[in-house]
């Protein structure tokens, strides 16, 4: 009998983080994929990641609408509560043999709590990483709830072990998102027009002449500063004058401030060198990255995939504080002059050396094989003394 593997995707980034594992699970002869899509992955204003999921041919077992309106701390907590109630019902209906949860978002901890209280073995992808802010608290809390750990780097594996997890439960698989980056690196040509395919708003230009990518999310522990922070980046990118492809932020406390800052800037300022997009397919986003001069903002894609691809990255602020970095990353504060200087330096220096901190391109297959072969039981914590 096939093992039923329930994977919960809660947001645009979590889909790109787990996509190759979904493919490997679906193709594995001993596994049955139960895909649950919920939270901001279902919402149009955050790019409707569910469209990408369906475009890739996945069958969705359940959709869970759980996001409370208003991007603030209270509604993050309420969304987590709604998710806990709704996902408990989904798991009761699907009866999975194991639940897989990804990374560190607040919806992710709802997945972990529901599975744990229902005595369903929980596998966690991307535990053990250090970033600061509420994301780190959530990630480490999920580690203590999880029974199996699929970590992306050796340092992450070491941290999970130091948290008291059993060595036999910790598996260094690499990050599934790097699998896609590895495929793109083999054939990186930009074979589509992003303006024609994805629309968006703003200036249009010849991407063949070079461009930068911008992706900046709010920081939940600094959510009241989100509008100021995005405005500094907007001024830096506008004043630099380089053609820029700018992608919409995710749903977190402060997202409303980030979005309002972008809209107000577009209404008041002349921004002919910036084009704004809601979302693109994961592989085509990485293809855009691979052909860019630099990525600017605070997304983990600059730390993970771009370190593998050798794409220069300007990381702004504290959102990725503590995360392992490759040689492609330069860190700056929320200051338009510092951001401009860092972008200019990267553009002048060109592509950087490549680092394989987060894997070599086979994480999805390794995760599927482990899910098929591991003894998946709920861990009895008191039996382990370290």
Image (tube, helix red, strand yellow):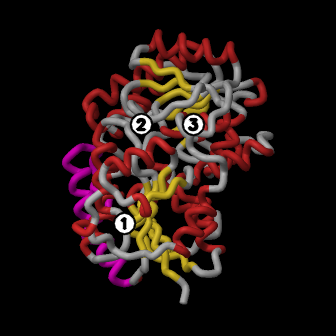
Viewer-side residue, 294 vs 208: 294
The residues tagged by marks 1 and 2 sit, at their Cα atoms, a distance apart of: 30 Å
Q: Residues within 10 Å of mark 1 (few under 14, many from 20)?
A: many
- Picture disc at residue 217: 2
User: Mark 3 = which residue?
Assistant: 201
From what the image shows, is residue 352 above or below residue 162? above
- Picture disc at residue 147: 1
For mark 2, give the secondary structure.
loop
From what the image shows, is residue 339 above or below residue 198? above
Can I make out residue 370 in this image? yes
- Picture disc at residue 307: none
In this image, 48 relative to 283: left or right?
Answer: left
Query: Magenta segment range?
Result: 65-93
From what the image shows, is residue 183 above or below residue 26? above
Q: Which image quadrant: the N terminus? A: bottom right
Q: Main secondary structure of the magenta part?
A: helix
For mark 1, give the secondary structure.
loop
Residue occupying image coordinates x 33% and y 82%: 92
Name which of mark 1 and mark 2 comes first in the sequence. Answer: 1
Viewer-side residue, 185 vs 245: 185
């Amino acid at each position: 009998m096939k093992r039923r593997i329930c994977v919960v995707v809660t947001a645009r980034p979590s889909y790109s983080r787990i996509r190759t594992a979904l493919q490997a699970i679906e193709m594995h002869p001993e596994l049955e994929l139960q895909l649950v899509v919920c939270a901001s992955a279902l919402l149009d204003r955050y790019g409707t990641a569910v469209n990408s999921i369906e475009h890739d041919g996945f069958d969705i077992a359940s959709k869970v609408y759980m996001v409370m309106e208003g991007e603030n701390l209270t509604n993050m907590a309420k969304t987590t509560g709604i998710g806990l109630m709704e996902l408990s019902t989904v798991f009761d209906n699907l009866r999975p043999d194991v639940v897989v949860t990804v990374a560190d978002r607040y919806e992710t901890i709802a997945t972990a709590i529901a599975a744990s209280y229902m005595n369903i073995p929980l596998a966690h992808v991307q535990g053990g990483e250090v970033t600061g802010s509420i994301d780190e608290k959530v990630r480490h809390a999920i580690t203590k709830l999880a029974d199996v750990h699929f970590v992306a780097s050796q340092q992450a594996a070491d941290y999970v072990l130091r948290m008291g997890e059993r060595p036999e439960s910790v598996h260094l698989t690499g990050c599934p998102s790097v699998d896609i980056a590895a495929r793109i690196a083999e054939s990186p040509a930009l074979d589509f027009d992003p303006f024609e395919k994805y629309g968006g708003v703003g200036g249009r230009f010849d991407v063949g002449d070079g461009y930068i990518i911008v992706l900046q999310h709010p920081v939940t522990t600094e959510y009241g500063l989100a509008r100021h922070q995005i405005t500094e980046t907007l001024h830096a990118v506008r004043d630099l004058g380089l053609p820029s492809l700018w992608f919409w932020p995710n749903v977190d406390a402060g997202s409303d401030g980030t979005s309002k800052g972008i809209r107000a800037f577009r209404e008041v300022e002349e921004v002919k060198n910036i084009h704004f997009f809601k979302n693109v397919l994961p592989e085509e986003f990485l293809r855009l990255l691979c052909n860019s001069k630099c990525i600017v903002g605070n997304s983990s894609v600059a730390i993970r995939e771009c370190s593998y691809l050798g794409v220069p990255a300007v990381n702004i602020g504290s959102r990725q504080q503590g995360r392992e970095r490759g040689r492609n990353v330069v860190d700056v504060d929320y200051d338009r002059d510092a951001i401009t200087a860092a972008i200019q330096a990267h553009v002048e220096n060109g592509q950087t050396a490549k680092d394989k901190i987060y894997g070599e391109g086979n994480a999805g297959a390794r995760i599927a094989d482990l899910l098929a072969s591991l003894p998946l039981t709920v861990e009895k914590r008191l039996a382990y003394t370290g």
